[in-house]
Image (tube, rainbow, N blue to C red):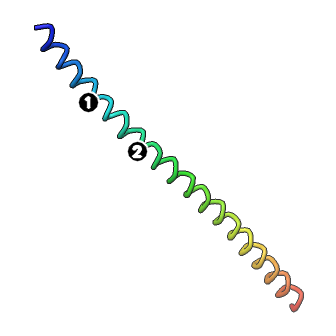
């Protein structure tokens, strides 16, 4: 009986170990996705700043003409 219980425990341990490994891989993928999205967000903020500056310049030039 003791050998059977130990075998079941080994199976459970392997099952949980594989779950932890899979979750670790998923966490790494998610971390990379977050890093990429943060970079895209920063790029979008820079582009918004550029467009805002161009718009302000255009508005200022139009106001000078009037």
Could you tell me residue 43's position as x and y percent? 65, 65
Which numbered disc flags the more N-terminal residue, 1 or 2? 1
Q: Where is residue 7 in the image (x, y as percent from the top left)?
A: 17, 19
Horizontal side of 5 relative to 32 (left or right) equals: left
Image coordinates of residue 12 in percent, x first then y, are 23, 24
Q: Name the residue under label 2.
A: 26
**Residue located beneath label 1 in the image:** 15
Q: For residue 62, what is the image quadrant?
A: bottom right
Q: Which of marks 1 and 2 is in front?
A: 1
Task: Answer above or below: position of 39 versus 50.
Answer: above
Q: Residue at x 67, y 63 (%)?
A: 45
Q: Position of residue 48 (x, y in %)?
A: 68, 69
Q: Up-down: is 29 above or below 6?
A: below
Report the label total: 2
Residue ID at (10%, 8%): 1
* Left or right for 22, reference 1: right
Residue 37 located left or right of residue 1: right
Local secondary structure at mark 2: helix
The vertical placement of 49 against 35, above or below, is below
Judged from this view, the residue extending furthest toward the left is 1
Q: Which of 22 and 52 is in front in this view?
A: 22
Circle on res. 63: none
Residue in the foreground of this view, choosing between 32 and 52: 32
Mark 1 surroundings: few (<14), some (14-19) or many (≥20) residues within 10 A: few
Q: Residue furthest right?
A: 64
């Amino acid at each position: 009986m003791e050998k059977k219980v130990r075998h079941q425990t080994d199976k459970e341990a392997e099952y949980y170990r594989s779950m932890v490994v899979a979750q670790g891989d998923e966490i790494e993928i998610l971390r990379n996705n977050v890093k990429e999205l943060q970079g895209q967000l920063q790029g979008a903020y820079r582009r918004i700043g550029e467009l805002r500056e161009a718009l302000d310049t255009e508005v200022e030039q139009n106001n000078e003409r009037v």
